[in-house]
Image (tube, rainbow, N blue to C red):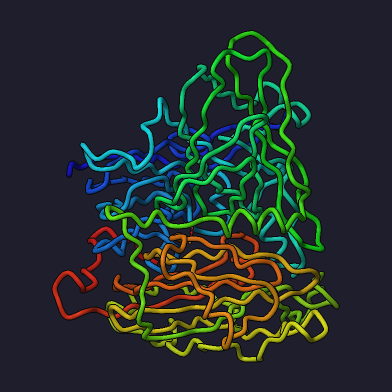
Amino acid sequence: GVTRHYKFDVRLQNVTRLCKTRSIPTVNGQFPGPKIITREGDRLIVHVINHLNRNITFHWHGVRQLQSQWADGPAYVTQCPIQGGQSYIYNFTVTGQRGTLVWHAHLSWLRVHLYGPLIILPKKGVAYPFPQPYKEVPIMFGEWFNSDPEAVIQQALQTGGGPNISDAYTINGLPGLLYNCSAKDTFKLNVKPSRTYLLRLINVALNTELFFSIANHSLTVVETDATYVKPISTNTLLISPGQTINVLLSTYQTTPNSSFLMAASPYTTTAGTFDNTTVAGILKYTAKILPAIKPTLPPFNDTTTATNFNTRLRSLASPSYPARVPMKIDRRFFFTVGLGTSPCPKNATCQGPNGTKFAASVNNVSFVSPSIAMLEAHYYRFLKGVFTANFPGVPLIPFNYTGTPPNNTFVNHGTKVVKLRFNTSVELVMQDTSIQGAESHPLHLHGHNFFVVGQGFGNFNPNTDPARFNLIDPNERNTVSVPSGGWVAIRWLADNPGVWLMHCHLDIHLSWGLSMAWVVEDGALFNQKLPPPPLDLPKC
Ligand code: C2O
């Protein structure tokens, strides 16, 4: 492979949306950030220079980081942040994967502004397992706040209550014509008739799963999270924060007398407030201004549509792209994921349920970010005071949906990990708990892909549900939604030594502690060992 160099100058830039100008952190003055494009097998060198007066880190979401664990990026997990005025070189080779991924900041809520597409083309001379598209177009969904998102999350953490919600969703940074004052800030896709386009959909919104549809056009899903799937055709799809979906779009055979809106709106079953608005872009066949046809999007709480879409996805599982589902399982885990509450600190007034503070947890443990990087503590073996290897394999308080909700809201705060021997095959069932209405949780695992072998509603039944697992062609992903009021089962092989965060990709839940980490120990061979840290690794 070749080596590709990118320079990320992180600095403030004035950006105007919804008629308000705000100074936001950007990469090279661009919002959204620059597109990184590479090929499978190539090395990426991203030189980050932080000109802000605050800490940042970057994460290459979905990149496995085999032998480059120090480049993964979550703050205080694989690295200390890059402080203002400092720099760090992310240096990694993309091995064994190709498709659409995303890069984003991985500290507090900074990813609201700092993100961009990360596109990995197949090796030279290797074709897609679907017709070669005429053009490829990244379509990123984001969120825009009129207020400063850092102030929004700080306020939520201090009061223990819910955060202010975003003011708009965006497509490639643009809210679009359905918002006031935004007609000129509308994403436009100019197409020719009788062609096939590959849309690389990326949801990097902070807190919202989204439905997406294009009026009068059906979409053929060919890839999820940079893994090929058996093509399925759909009018509406669901994409969760942290997920990417490639779709083929076939245009009309002759130029139609209208243009078409592409639009995204929220999917949520929360009882709390959320941004219930719609972002739209335009699909145009001619330069003429033509009436636009709107797509019909499902109602925000349409769990049937959400579930039907997710359960149709299957790995391509072809001879060239086999589904390597672990068959013999070494370790099984059951995790509850959901919201909880913790006591209000003395001398504070909390706005969470019954005067408590909102928290979120995995197995009743709410993740506390350490103040030095866990991967360094692991590598240099100075674990004391950084993390403990006693993350519970089952919930601290048994969970049962048949109780009166909200139930099992107890949380214990700590920085706990599960240690895994190199090459352990894992089966993990994640059960959603509910408080004040259930919500689904898009769980993202760093450093690995996993197979979604089963999902269902209500309590997971260990006696009957595993018999229905799909071990032939399950969808392979790096982010899966634990369904609202249900469970999901995943299988993966822990073949990447290091410290790997697993967390809800809704930033509010991550801020509340819906996160844990796995430590994968070294294997015996040279290329199964965690390499030493790069010399420029930031210090805390
Ligand atoms: Cu896309 Cu830990 O993140």
**Quarter residue 269 falls in:** bottom right
Residue at image point 50% right, 61% down: 479
Q: Which of 152 and 305 is in front in this view?
A: 305
Residue 19 higher or lower than 411, as above or below:
above
Residue 259 higher or lower than 38, as above or below:
above
Rendered location of residue 534, percent (x, y) = 24, 61
Rendered location of residue 450, percent (x, y) = 42, 66
**Quarter residue 163 falls in:** bottom right
Residue 404 placement, left or right of 480: right
Rendered location of residue 32, percent (x, y) = 52, 37
Rendered location of residue 95, percent (x, y) = 25, 54
Q: Nearer the viewer, residue 33 or 391?
A: 391
Q: Which of 170 and 535 is in front in this view?
A: 170
Q: Nearer the viewer, residue 444 or 79?
A: 444
Examine the rendering and report whether any part of residue 360 can be seen.
no
Residue at image point 28% right, 42% down: 122
Residue at image point 67% right, 81% down: 459
Residue 437 higher or lower than 307, as above or below:
below
Quarter in which the C terminus is drawn: bottom left
Residue at image point 30% right, 64% down: 69
Residue 297 placement, left or right of 536: right
Residue 436 higher or lower than 344, as above or below:
above
Q: Which residue lies furthest to the left in this view?
A: 526
Quarter in which the N terminus is drawn: top left
Residue 502 placement, left or right of 359: left
Examine the rendering and report whether any part of residue 533 can be seen.
yes
Residue 318 placement, left or right of 512: left
